[in-house]
Image (cartoon, rainbow, N blue to C red):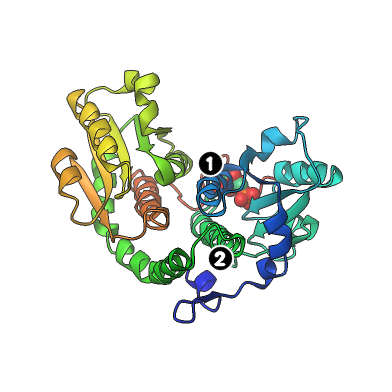
Amino acid sequence: VFDCLRGRLDAKAGTIRMGGIDRQLDLLKEAKRIILVGCGTSWHAGLLAEYVFEELCRVPVEVEYASEFRYRNPVIHPGDVIIAISQSGETADTLVALENAKNQGAFIFGVVNVVGSSIARLSQAGAYTHAGPEIGVASTKAFTAQLTVLYLIAIKLGYAKGTLSRDRYLHLINELALIPDKITEVLKTAPEVACLAGKYKNARDFLFLGRGYNFPIALEGALKLKEISYIHAEGYPAAEMKHGPIALVEESLPVVFVATKDAYHEKLASNAQEIKARKGNVLAIITERDTLFEEIADDTIAVPASDEILAPLLSVVPLQLLAYYTGLAKGLDVDKPRNLAKSVTV
Ligand code: F1P
């Protein structure tokens, strides 16, 4: 995130410099549809980008698991822009899905970490995330960098299309410029998160809930915990609880709410009350000084306030830390989780 923002974004001048997107801005403006394609964590980045592109750019957006998209017979039109998201740039499912779509006339825009990788080479344009090599197998900083690049594209495109006012554009780039310092603050919660990992490390199951921009983050929190600590975890939109998953709630089930302040805050608080009424344990990632959730939750981790659309860049970090410390507390090798490969090339 730091490297991504440094050098690209001048908050004072109100400019974002991104060669990869600047050169394709006209094409992106004309896109009839944007289709975001990826696997695993990269798919979660795509899901959040769907919300962000719809909000800021008012363009039809779809998000697809490459591992399904490649085997379907999707309707692709020239004028469709596929944003391919991949840390390694070598994921076979993503590569094949892109080849199929490109053959049908879609334009491929890559958001890839590894320079010169297969997906980067297949892309007709793109913006590298430049997150540096991931030390472990599970994607963490690559996710935050993917989100940052996707936000930068959406903000630039929305402004160019006129769907984002100049005031809102300036506000968002100012807020983005503050994110690196806020992430530094969030990282200071590591000792608190480590304590919670110790408290919950023997749980058999976890639920992760969020709404709106924090729904993809709930999914990512659950995936990270599964990958690194081998605890069964499910992520759901909080409003889906009543449609089935609430049957899972029993005494002491840890339920993580991604609850930074946004338009849905009070609804999310009532979802948390429903968990408490069934004797589940509520662990909430909140915006600092959120007395509503502080009263309801058993445990809270606070992150600094920010514009609600950018809050996922902050709310995901405690969840990555939770997975990391839970894995450590269980004596696992967090860098090399069993059965996982850094790039899935088959
Ligand atoms: C996709 C992915 C990662 C996950 C694991 C397996 O990889 O699902 O998100 O952490 O490494 O592969 P990529 O296409 O983003 O490299």
Residue 258 drawn at (x, y percent): 33, 44
Query: Which residue does the image show at 34% across and 29% down from the upper left?
Result: 204
Disc marking residue 131: 2
Q: Earlier in the sequence, mark 1 or mark 2?
A: 2
Which residue is the extreme one toward the right? 103
Q: Secondary structure at mark 1?
A: loop
Q: Please rate how many residues cluster around mark 2, counting C-alpha atoms within 10 Å: few if below 14, some from 14 to 19, many from 20.
A: many
Callout 1, which amino acid?
Arg
Query: Which residue does the image show at 65% across and 55% down from the upper left?
Result: 88
Q: Which residue is mark 1?
A: 338
Disc marking residue 65: none
Residue 292 drawn at (x, y percent): 17, 44
- The answer to whether 103 appears left or right of 206 in the picture is right
Q: Are marks 1 and 2 in contact (CB under 8 Å)?
A: no
Residue 166 drawn at (x, y percent): 48, 68
Task: Mark 1 vs mark 2: give the one in front.
Answer: 2
- The answer to whether 8 appears left or right of 266 in the picture is right
Q: CA distance from mark 1 to mark 2?
A: 24 Å
Residue 211 drawn at (x, y percent): 38, 39
Callout 2, which amino acid?
Ala
Screen quadrant of the C terminus: top right
